[in-house]
Amino acid sequence: MPEARDGELQLRVKACGLNFIDLMVRQGNIDNPPKTPLVPGFECSGIVEALGDGVKGFEIGDRVMAFVNYNAWAEVVCTPVEFVYKIPDDMSFSEAAAFPVNFVTAYMMLFEVANLREGMSVLVHSAGGGVGQAVAQLCSTIPSVTVFGTASSFKHEAIKDSVTHLFDRNADYVQEVKRISSEGVDIVLDCLCGENTGKGLSLLKPLGTYILYGSSNMVTGETKSFFSFAKSWWQVEKVNPIKLYEENKVIAGFSLLNLLFKQNRGGLIKGIMDKLIMLYNEKKIKPVVDSLWALEEVKEAMQRIHDRGNIGKLILDVEKAPTPLMANDSTETSEAGEEEEDHEGDNENKERMPFIQ
Ligand SMILES: NC(=O)c1ccc[n+]([C@@H]2O[C@H](COP(=O)([O-])OP(=O)(O)OC[C@H]3O[C@@H](n4cnc5c(N)ncnc54)[C@H](OP(=O)(O)O)[C@@H]3O)[C@@H](O)[C@H]2O)c1
């Protein structure tokens, strides 16, 4: 049982967020992966159970959401008070566990890094995912923002109201965007990496900003593939800084976890969380929860992301009992090192399982 140290809160966890980065951690597809065994997870919601020395502003019993530097997928966690935020009365624990990573990432990129303003245009990949939907909702808080998004086709019907122009993830999105807006876009949010870096830069209007914030392309199967890792790295466009100033383009990178846990910007993020909670209270944003899973079902939950099946965020519900697997359920993992088949279209006919919200 972890105990709250000085400046920490101990939380009884109700729900945990499952993020794409958790897949990458499991595969060791990140910088300096921690030694195993480890408890994964970077965010959760729950109830304050104990206060460490020096903690102010919280009481036992408060409903909260929190960032945790690993170890979030547990029944009890301890985390520094600067990473904990009270949740509004009408926000459920599932929504709260879906909130911090997705919305802070989206907000920081749009407003702190790229300075999104009225009339601008944004391109976002994986538009149906957790961050993608947060980006779309935050864009809708600014007048006349055009959102271009890529996503697997079967998601288009579900997310069409949040994204102005949707393209299939395999479409030639550079051509598609230019067909609609010959000048390109003001902001490109790239979580795929690889060849998309060059494509994203080519789509920027003068004074536009390209932000790299993920490398989803490195995840191809159940286990780490050195081939896709090397391919992604090799395909990243080599950028000539002289061209940047000649063309008036901005390139940026963003990593929320590094900002929080390595670069000590908890204070900055606290201010952003306050603004986001205000937007939630004004009913301008609301986390999209794809499905709830018991802790025992984490393998199937991760498989759903691998299979590109999610629309919004997957939540691990600590109090949920595991759902018995359906007879025709196939959540087989691929063999070690084996590249997985392209799952395009698989989900169209897939029977949705009973735990979908
Ligand atoms: N830098 C940061 O601070 C930060 C913070 C949060 C997230 N991120 C990054 O943002 C991206 C989205 O994160 P998220 O947690 O919101 O996840 P998510 O978008 O919900 O992730 C799942 C979706 O990603 C798409 N995808 C793209 N490449 C994939 C692949 N190789 N395998 C499986 N799915 C793939 C699929 O959608 P489609 O098939 O519809 O494209 C899939 O449904 C990730 O790259 C993540 O690492 C970065």
Image (spheres, grey):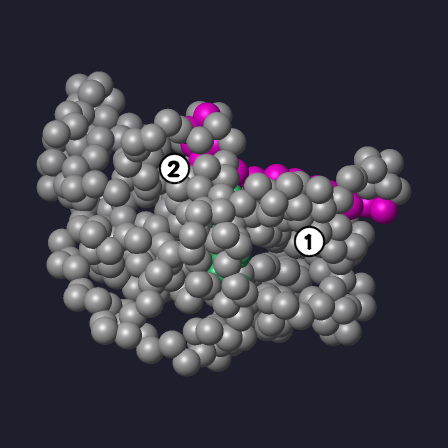
Image coordinates for residue 205, horizontal then vertical, percent? 78, 56
Residue at 78% across / 55% down in the picture? Answer: 202
**Is 267 one of the magenta-colored residues?**
no
Residue with the mark numbered 1: 196
Along the line of sight, the residue nearer the viewer: 163 or 191? 191
Looking at the picture, how far across and down is residue 319, in whole percent? 13, 54
Q: In the image, which residues are magenta?
A: 247-262
- Judging depth in this view, the residue of 71 and 344 nearest the camera is 344
- Closer-to-camera residue (342/130): 342
Q: Quadrant of residue 142?
A: bottom right
Q: Locate residue 2 relative to residue 19 in the image: left or right.
A: left
Please say whether residue 168 is visible from this viewpoint.
yes
> Helix, strand, or loop for circle 1?
helix
Q: Which residue does the image show at 38% across and 76% down from the upper left?
A: 350
> Magenta segment: does it hold 261?
yes
Residue 253 image-quadrant placement: top right
Is 242 on the left or on the right of 351, as rendered?
A: right
Q: Residue at x 52, y 63 (%)?
A: 341
The image's mark for residue 270 is 2
Given the image, on which type of amino acid does mark 1 rest? Asn
Callout 2 crowding tier (Cα within 10 Å): few <14, some 14–19, many ≥20: some
Residue placed most toward the observer, 320 or 181: 320
Q: Quadrant of the N terminus?
A: top left
Query: What's the CA distance linking mark 1 and mark 2?
Result: 32 Å
Give x and y (percent) for residue 256.
Answer: 48, 38
Spot occupied by residue 241 in the image (x, y as percentages of width and height): 82, 35
In the displayed structure image, the side of residue 73 where residue 115 appears, left or right = right
Identify residue type, mark 2: Lys
Q: Earlier in the sequence, mark 1 or mark 2?
A: 1
